[in-house]
Amino acid sequence: MTGDIDLTREERTTFVSEACDQIDEAEEILLEMEAAGGQFGRRSDDTEKLATLFRAMHTIKGNAATVGLSNIECMAHVAEDMMEKVRAGEVAVGEEVADLMLTAVDQLRDMIDDFACERPMTDPPGDLLQRIRARLEPGDEASQSAAGDEVGPAEFDNLLKELSSSADWAEEERLITVDVDLSEDADLPAVRALQCIMACEENARTAASRPRRDDLEAGRVGDVRKVQCLLVSDAEPQHVQQAIRQITGISDVQVTVRDDRPIAVQKQAEEDDGVEARFRGNGSLQQIRVDVSVLDRLMNLSGEMVINRNRLSSLVREARDADSEGLLEQMQETVEEMGRATMDLQEDIMEMRLLPLDDLFRRFPRMMRNLRKSSGKAFRFTVDGGETEIDRSLMEVIGDPLTHILRNAVDHGIESPEARASAGKDPEAEIRLSAHRNESSIVVQVSDDGAGIDVDALRDNARDRGLLSQVDETISDEDLLDVIFSPGFSTSEKVTEISGRGVGLDVARRNIESVNGNISVQSWAGRGAEFRISLPLTVTTVKSLLVRIGGQVYVVPLSSVRETLSLHEAAIQRAGGKPVLHYRESFIPVFHLHDFFPDIEERRRRDGEEYLVVLQADKGSLGMKVDALLGEEDCVIKPLGRPVDDIPGISAATILPDGRVALILDAAGLFNEMRSVERSVK
């Protein structure tokens, strides 16, 4: 339920964002609490973690009350009471309490998601509230109901008389009584009664209520059908009545102004100053939230500046040929100044787009905890490198692939405790998620110490599916492992709830390669497997080498260029009918784009001299013939639309200084395509 407060889009977004941050933080601590069991609370920092957990629930409750979300406030308040008991040592820390609180966190997340998507919000489940209250106040329902019956009308009536006879009045305030009747068939009557009191508090300060709010929250009230509230308020009675009538299960509401005279009631200082204070923040705030669309617009603007800078550089070169010395100097200065400004703007915006991988990684411990329970397998899950920063768009791309790979590790990678023990291994397996940054990329790895991938079973399965029908049996294990990324490939005999969700590793590879990244796998029999995802540092610009092939200009990211060579055609040898080059004590395959795209013209230089760009992919090097090397350039990446966005070896496009469009080549895709062509002709 939402009260009468009319939130702006920014206020709604801020509430949801802050609530999600609090829930993520609470979930992380609860998972640690569950894993530690009875040991939690003995370490020096555990006390602070419990305080953080309490503050998270308290903040969600307060924010929800401020914006009129009584359902969320009710759920958070009950969870807050539980954490207060744990913090005070009245409820023992253990798996049961952690599990109960994780369920409450899930419920809060669902309710906040409903609010964010403007869907009807569900009420807190009655069985969950009852389970939490049972832990707070052990005892049967009869004793709880009896405790509620002890609250009589005397205190309520005495307070009414005392306030009405007061001689000291504050301007604009009035004394109001609210009488609410609940329907006989109203579900969760105690929750409805609590919502009525909260609705009153949204419009006034509640001096008293019957039954008491704390009794309702503690579950000490049984079947309640009537609620009375005594308010001190300057609100119009119809506003109070309207707010209560929005609650499900209400049969009648009577709101009465007891006296037209204001009464003297010193308003109690509230914990919050209202919606304005919630969203206004304070002067010491060092961080801001920026709408993603704003960042996208700024990024596109900086990209256009790069294009214009390159165009201006081209004009300078043309003017130099015209021998306009004075103009040249001015234009050159302009180019340099624009270059510095463009680079600063671009770096600032790129930094704004960076997010720590922790924002993604923190979702996985909970998922793995649930998989541990449902699979019956014992394993430790460790996460390293969460502080590594990555472009937010890349984080969106790798979320689903990582989920799929981690589920596969549990379902197919690690063995049962019995099988591990019989193999002489620790019955508890280990699955590790890690990330680090190197000079040219972000690397994310998922590894396990399970049985590894059964290469023989993989070969048989691939042969049965026709994937190896034309390949001889000498294919290396490394090449064979690449088969698991084929569309529709699976070694599972049945679909499971853990990993059999109809999404294969081919989808993961396609998503990752769409941002100029790549994914590979290694396996060691009996010792485990490792998936390695390599991603570019940015998806907006790329330092590149421009080359000419068949009359067209192509772009090669410098991160993929190992070396450029000028060589005579005679230096290229043949092995197995294929061109190769003896390069640094090994032979690397040599190709021309014409091999993959027949429409590209393969020209021959009259002097027999050729240029070769040595490309570096994860699985090795390869040489690409080019007609000319045109120099280096900072290129703005422009994504390709369908149907050309999934062509192997081409990742994106860019706009050249002369306005022409050039394709950006993908070394990993070219390497895989070359291997595929080689296998198909064997």
Image: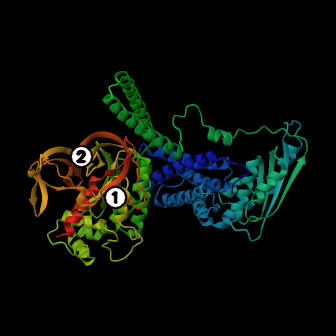
**Considering only vertical position in the picture, is 344 above or below 241?**
above
Q: Earlier in the sequence, mark 1 or mark 2?
A: 1
What residue is drawn where x is 71% and y is 57%? Answer: 195
Q: At 32% from the left edge and 74% from the top edge, which residue is drawn? A: 492
Secondary structure under tag 2 reads strand
Left-right relation of 492 to 35 = left
Q: Is residue 334 above or below residue 629?
A: above
Occupied quadrant, residue 588? bottom left
Whether residue 266 can be seen here? yes
Which residue is tagged 1?
380
The answer to whether 465 appears left or right of 232 in the picture is: left
Q: Nearer the viewer, residue 264 or 511?
A: 511
Q: Looking at the image, can residue 524 be seen?
A: no
Residue type of the residue flagged with mark 2: Val
Q: Tag 1: Cα neighbours inside 10 Å, few (<14), some, or many (≥20)?
A: some
Q: Residue 571 location, x and y as percent?
A: 9, 50
Q: Quick one: quadrant of the N terminus?
A: bottom right
User: What amino acid type is highlighted by mark number 1?
Assistant: Arg
Q: CA distance from mark 1 to mark 2?
A: 39 Å
The residue that mark 2 highlights is 561
